Amino acid sequence: MKSKMIIVAVIAIIAVVAVGLYATGTFNNHSNLENQEIQLAAAASLKNAYDKELIPLFEQKHPGVKVTPTYASSGDLQTQIENGLKADVFMSAANKQMNALVEKDLIDNSTNVQFLENKVVLIVPADSSANISSFDDLKNVNGNIAIGNPDSVPAGQYAKEVLTNLKLWNETESKLSFGNDVTAVLNQVADGSADCGIVYSTDAKSNDKVKVVCEAPEGSLNTPVIYPVAMVKDSQHSDAAKEFIDFLQTKEAKDIFEKYGFTIHENK
């Protein structure tokens, strides 16, 4: 009788420990994910948040799992995925590129989350003395206005939308200098090769060689700047990819995104 009671007590202790391990994620987050490498394809504007904090934090929480990022414009990443890039997770700076991949059945749409929001801003070099205080002043700029290439860069598509809706596109088109991604646009303004540029507020915040003149006026964007994230359908590491997307939606990860200037999109 006594031995049976001891066995029951031991089983009870094991059960309590097991529940604790599941609650902390030790079993379901670690044991089945070891030695997996997550290939992350992410918009260039996410690089600082991912490289400096989010990827190291995820890898710390999941020993044995490695996250390898590829950063570029969302349009370039879309094309690369269409051409066979071995990505597990795609995070775009606009719905256009994500939706194109969904239509081609390259995204697991059940994992597709409308996640972050950003703002479009007009910037100038930090030491600029140019008389630029609003988008309307772009009509009088004599030098270059840097924007992302509207054909492939979401920031450039948003910039064109703003300029078109403000009836400034025709007056500024000849002055535009296109960058291959938003980071290239930021660098043009930071090094003074462009008099001003249109980027995301998060990018402007990351570089003290530029200053923000103003945000895009209310009504100049037809849609908010949304960053969706989803798993690529042919992911070779789907368990780890889903775990990574779940991690991004934790309060800890959201706080980091907000620290870098993003806001969390409230799904309704």
Image (cartoon, rainbow, N blue to C red):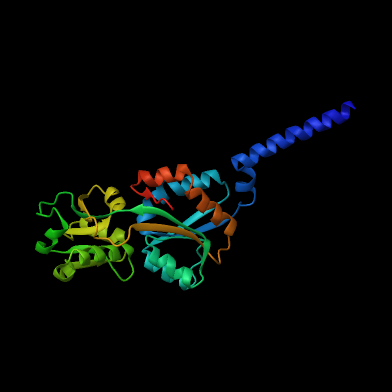
Residue at image location 40% in from the left, 44% down from the top: 256
In the rendered image, the residue lying farthest to the top is 2
179 or 132: nearer the viewer: 132
Q: Specify the farthest residue to the right.
A: 1
Percent position (x, y) of residue 163? 21, 64
Residue visible at 35% across and 46% down in the picture = 260
Q: Residue 205: percent from the left, percent from the top?
A: 28, 48
Q: Quadrant of the N terminus?
A: top right
- At horizontal 37% and vertical 57% (from top left) the residue drawn is 226
For the point 36% across and 43% down, the residue is: 259
- Residue 59 position, x and y percent, is 52, 47
Between 13 and 265, the one nearer to me in the picture: 265
Residue 120, quarter of the rendered image:
bottom left
Give the vertical position of 130 relative to 176 (above or below). above
Image position of 119 (left or right of 240): left
Q: Residue furthest front?
A: 268
